Amino acid sequence: MEMYNLGQDDIVGNSAPRQNPDPIEAHRSDCREFFEHAHAAISVICANLDQQLGLPLDTLIRRSSIDQPSETSLRLLLSWPQTGDAEVGDNRQITLGGHTDIGTLTLLFHVSGGLQILPADKDNVAENWRYIRPEPGCALINVGDTLVEWTGGILRSSLHRVVTAPGEQARVARQSLAYLVRPRRTETMHRIQGSDVIPPLGEGEEEDTRSVSDWAAWRARQVMNGELKPRTTGGRRVVTRA
Ligand SMILES: O=C(O)CCC(=O)C(=O)O
Ligand SMILES: [Fe+2]
């Protein structure tokens, strides 16, 4: 697996420009347009979530504004074709290990198969992972861990991974794009207040006062050191507005 992360701040001008590889530098304005479109799509999703969560309109999108510094990025992923016998399930290679996305929302653009999720109530064994078939003309939306924390576990971030695609697709390179939305840097991990849907902190629960960046760095470190096993989190049942 090869990947390259293109920073939103770099492309839209929230920070000094970085020197990216030539094919990107030659298409800076296309990249900017991509970020703007992707952000517009995220705004629609956030507005719907605001409504469902009983929050004032724009609560969520204001926390991920495109013109404020954040760690939002566009990840370009490439998995090389698998050599050998990929038809046999056990021989499939895992090219991106099981994880949850750390930010708020992810827009995933994929054309060939290979993405799998582990349904929330299932054990992490090979036969329980399900392929997610790409739908022509559609992007896949993932909820990330930050939104789970902000909503007191109402929203769910699912464990997912990339393996060799089924059938003949195993013989072609797989390319995908993940627009990984992170909150603006000034935001904290405090649970969102002012909603009658998001539960208040319960007994024994403590407010997480860390900045989103400190929290994300801590979490990534924990996963890397093996102290935290990535798993699906959140998904509390609540009554939402019609
Ligand atoms: O390439 C894919 O389909 C998934 C990528 C992904 O999960 C990620 O970059 O976080
Ligand atoms: Fe992911």
Image (cartoon, helix red, strand yellow):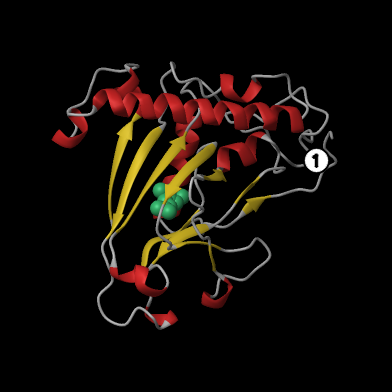
Q: Is residue 78 left or right of residue 224?
A: left
Q: Is residue 239 left or right of residue 47?
A: right
Vertical comparison of 150 with 137: above or below: above
Q: Quadrant of the N terminus?
A: bottom left
Indicate the position of residue 103 as horizontal and vertical percent values.
50, 38
Q: Label 1's element?
A: loop
The answer to whether residue 85 of the structure is visible from this angle is yes
- As shown in the figure, which amino acid type bears the numbered disc 1? Glu
Q: Quadrant of residue 111?
A: bottom left
Frontmost residue, 161 versus 87: 87
Mark 1 is surrounded, within 10 Å at the Cα level, by few (under 14), some (14 to 19) or many (20 or more) other residues, namely: few
Frontmost residue, 138 versus 226: 138
> Label 1, on which residue?
203
Frontmost residue, 60 versus 111: 111
What residue sits 46% from the left and 41% below the top? 218
Q: Is residue 47 left or right of residue 97?
A: right
What residue sits 25% from the left and 17% below the top? 16
What residue sits 40% from the left and 30% below the top? 71
Q: Across the whole image, how many numbered discs are drawn on residues?
A: 1
| Ligand 2 neighbours mark 1 (CB distance < 8 Å) | no
Vertical comparison of 158 with 93: above or below: above
Indicate the position of residue 151 as horizontal and vertical percent values.
69, 36
Indicate the position of residue 223 as horizontal and vertical percent values.
45, 53
Q: Is residue 32 left or right of residue 184?
A: left
Indicate the position of residue 241 as horizontal and vertical percent values.
84, 33
Vertical comparison of 19 with 179: above or below: above
Q: Quadrant of the C terminus?
A: top right
The answer to whether residue 222 of the structure is visible from this angle is no
